[in-house]
Image (cartoon, rainbow, N blue to C red):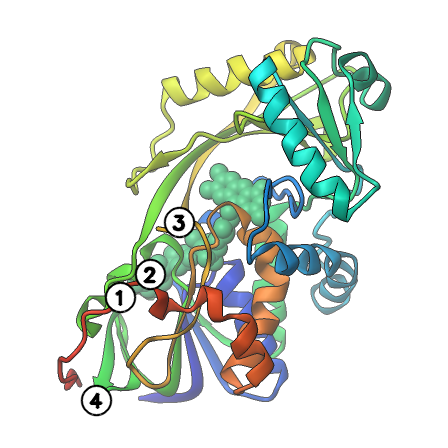
Amino acid sequence: MKIYDHMIIGGGVIGCSIAYRLAKEGLSVAVFDAGQAGQASMAAGGMLGAQNEFERENPLLGIALESRGMFPQLRDELLSETGIDIELRTAGLIKTAATEQDRDELQQQYYFLSKKDPSIQWLEPEEVPEIEPCMTSQTAGAIFLEKDHQVKAPLLAQAFLKAALHAGVHVYEETKALRLLIQQNRIMGIGTSIGSFHAAQVTIAAGAWSSHLLVDTDFSLPVIPVKGECLSIRLAGPAPVKTIFAVDGCYIVPKRNKEMLIGATSIPDTFDTSVTARGILSLLQRASHLLPVLSDGTIHRTWVGVRPQAADHLPVMGSHPFIEGLYICTGHYRNGILLSPITGILMKDYINGCQETHKLLTPFAPGRFSVVSGAKHTIMK
Ligand SMILES: Cc1cc2nc3c(=O)[nH]c(=O)nc-3n(C[C@H](O)[C@H](O)[C@H](O)COP(=O)(O)OP(=O)(O)OC[C@H]3O[C@@H](n4cnc5c(N)ncnc54)[C@H](O)[C@@H]3O)c2cc1C
């Protein structure tokens, strides 16, 4: 039976970012993934929407801005450690309104964001094609967020995984965590599809599946799956360079080789991974309205991912409310790519007992959700 200092269940961007930082501190770390590492992480659009995502004050805003600012250095660090270029593109994001009601909403967001950052621009419809020539003036206005960059999410997931491996992390793919081994309210290890492993510390970073692992701990974590369908279209002619995001949530993220990533549907409470005609049709209709040149392109790929969403839409980061040594890190919902660099660092500091980080993460504590406690934990196999 193997013994580690710290074990992480889930090998997506969140699990691997934490594993990488802990291993660099000298801990012996293992990551277990039920499949190939990273589910939602491999499906994401890769937008670093630290401003796009916020319309009013939110405890996550400061953390999101800080995480976005880490990407240029992270790109260099991951490139030198792994040889993988995460394709950070710095052309910014245009958020557009389609109706007068959208325009009012967007103006409210503009007032909120521009008070903190004067670089944000309001664009009248005729100014939109001046900033992004592939777009038309058929909008009801837009804002330009020049600092909301993007990366290629599957490359980021692979780079975090490879960096973790290089730092000495043992990665067990195709290895499902089946149960937590708990004795007298203390984590002792995990039982997996290939046997048991021991560690005094375990982090559950299993994305949308995280709550399944907590059933034996009498703590119900309200994190649900939210299915998202996507497609990509290759353009032969002129192509935009900026991310285009509509107030209704449809977006186009330009990748290398004029590949336009189009996302995403939002279907709560399902782990279904089928790509539906209804989903693709609605994306195509909305995206081609935003960017008419899409109609001349060829469909390259379709796919699905499942986002982890907590009941209050905030991530869940911190200690299990009453199992010592057990940590939970999930619920990053639409922003796990954006938040992955800072999450690894914050969780490493939290696990190492940094009081400042414990304070910073208070709004995200798992214990904010109702707790049914009192059971004795003697599961040990
Ligand atoms: C369509 C779509 C578009 C998105 N776009 C963006 C975007 O533009 N920007 C952004 O910042 N974020 C975006 N996101 C959100 C982002 O992808 C997620 O928040 C992030 O990937 C979550 O990472 P994770 O590591 O928590 O989960 P995942 O990547 O899902 O990883 C969890 C892992 O846990 C494993 N696992 C589950 N159960 C077990 C078990 N019992 N034992 C072992 N392993 C287990 C799974 O196999 C999986 O690999 C998008 C998501 C989707 C679906």
Q: Amino acid type of disc 4?
A: Gln
Of the two numbered discs 1 and 3 on the same chain, state the one appearing first in sequence: 1
SS of the residue at dot 2? Answer: helix
Tell me the quarter of the image containing the N terminus.
bottom left
Of callouts 4 and 2, which one flags the residue occurring earlier in the amino acid sequence? Answer: 4
The response on whether ligand 1 sits within 8 Å of label 2 is yes
Q: Quadrant of residue 276?
A: top left
Q: Residue 210 carries which label?
A: 2
Q: Which of 277 and 228 lies nearest the eye of the viewer?
A: 228
Marks 4, 3: nearer the viewer: 3
Q: Are the residues flagged by discs 1 and 2 in contact, CB closer than 8 Å?
A: yes
User: Is disc 3 placed on a helix, strand or loop?
Assistant: strand
Q: In this view, does 203 lie above or below 120?
A: below
Q: Where 285 sits versus 373, above or below?
A: above
Pointer 2: residues within 10 angstroms few (<14), some, or many (20+)?
Answer: many
* Residue occupying image coordinates x 23% and y 84%: 182
In the drawing, what numbered circle is on residue 213? 1
Mark 4 vs mark 3, CA separation in Å: 30 Å
Image side of residue 322 versus residue 105, left or right: left
**Residue for point 61% across, 54% down:** 61
Q: Which mark is residue 183?
A: 4
Residue 228 appears anywhere in the view: yes
Q: In which quarter of the image is residue 136?
A: top right
